[in-house]
Amino acid sequence: MGEPLGLEANRVRLAHYDPRWAVAFAAEAARLREALGPYALAIEHIGSTAIPGIPAKPILDIGVAVQRFEEAAACVPLLERLGYEYLGENGIPRRHFLRRGHPTTHHLHITEIGSRQWEEHLLFRDYLRSHPDEAQRYAALKRELAQRHPNDRDAYLEGKAAFITAVLDAARAWQRRQPLDAARLSHAVQVLASRDPHLAAIVAAHGPPPLWQRPPGFATLLAIILEQQVSLASAQAAFRRLRALADPLTPATFLALDDATLRTIGFSRQKTAYGRELAQALLTGALNLEVLADLDDEEALHILTRLKGIGRWTATVYLLEALLRPDVWPADDLALATAVQTALQWPRRPSPAEMERLAEPWRPWRAVAARLFWHAYLEGYWPEAMTAMG
């Protein structure tokens, strides 16, 4: 697997990517989980050896996330029993750094889950794993810098800095477009609970929230229009009656129903008009819901809200539940505002502007924070009480 880095701090030694690095990490992670027990919320392979195809110093960089940084101190003696040498923060605040040698050097970084350092390590790794062209550019840069500065580690690191910054900027935009799944939801819940005691209390009392996924397309967007400014129970009843009349529910089958029929199943005159406009836009191609998956949140919201009857709330809920965007925040949702008021023990319900401000610390997982608050709301109130603003 190449020679260890050793203690020659200024040497820059790169090895070709070796698939055995992943195997070595898995074995070491198993040892760490057994030794650290509940202290380790997550153990991740980070650094260049974690990215296939990238040349790297033959070092396994291992990240260990703890709930609170203070818990890291309790991990140190447990790790020393495994042969790790404790080196303190080693120039990076709120990170404990340990090292273990031979046959491959292991560098172990202990940080709080959800910390900037933790999130950036994972984001950089995952972005390059998903973008082979960018990974190859990084590989070429590393080779060039290693040849240019074989005995000057600081110059080598400085040469990579601009590339890493640019990748992280692109990766943050990419991250906002990646749909939530069970694994990302679980990770985000851990992160949010570590950052905010109110969200931690919700998780402790009610557990993690559901994903609340709806299929993208006309039927879901029409259902969300029905939910504007009414109880979910009445909206769902009208939608069930609609599905019974139009099966499958498509723009064409919806337009085939006359206004009188739609009124009998619960459509107001206004929502009938909104539904017809949406159906016509999809049939004529004026609106293409499939392209939204490739757009940033604001671009997707702009396209949706150009259509009459689709306001910011409707568009945001579509992105949150149909596209599973991780960082959209329906600031004008009444049930969400009520849940926030209860959790924060405010004497009144926060305004949409206050909701926007309150949610800033929950980026890039504001949609998961919304799910947590809705989860708490539904545990305390019947679903029929939920209303929303369109």
Image (cartoon, rainbow, N blue to C red):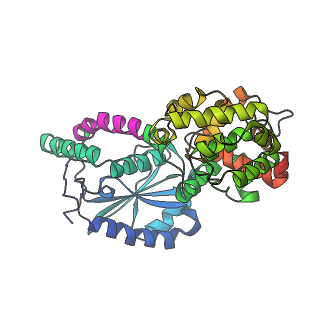
Segment colored magenta: 155-171
Horizontal and vertical percent position of residue 169: 40, 35
Horizontal and vertical percent position of residue 122: 43, 50
Q: Nearer the viewer, residue 15 or 221?
A: 221
Q: Relative to residue 235, is residue 81 drawn left or right?
A: left
Please tell me which residue is depicted at 67% across the width and 36% down the height of the picture: 275
Residue 342 in the image: above or below residue 2: above
Q: Relative to residue 164, is residue 342 drawn left or right?
A: right
Q: Nearer the viewer, residue 324 or 193?
A: 324
Please tell me which residue is depicted at 85% across the width and 52% down the height of the picture: 382
In this rendering, the count of numbered labels is 0
Please tell me whether residue 167 belongs to the stretch shown in magenta: yes
Please tell me whether residue 14 belongs to the stretch shown in magenta: no
Q: Relative to residue 214, is residue 50 drawn left or right?
A: left
Horizontal and vertical percent position of residue 101: 30, 65
Please tell me which residue is depicted at 58% across the width and 57% down the height of the picture: 186
Please tell me which residue is depicted at 65% across the width and 43% down the height of the picture: 254
Kindly report the secondary structure that dominates the magenta region of the rendered protein.
helix
Q: Relative to residue 34, is residue 305 drawn left or right?
A: right
Horizontal and vertical percent position of residue 109: 43, 54
Residue 197 in the image: above or below residue 272: below
The N terminus: image quadrant: bottom left
- Visible residue check, residue 133: yes
Residue 301 in the image: above or below residue 179: above
- Visible residue check, residue 201: no
The C terminus: image quadrant: top right
Residue 93 in the image: above or below residue 53: above
Q: Residue furthest left?
A: 147
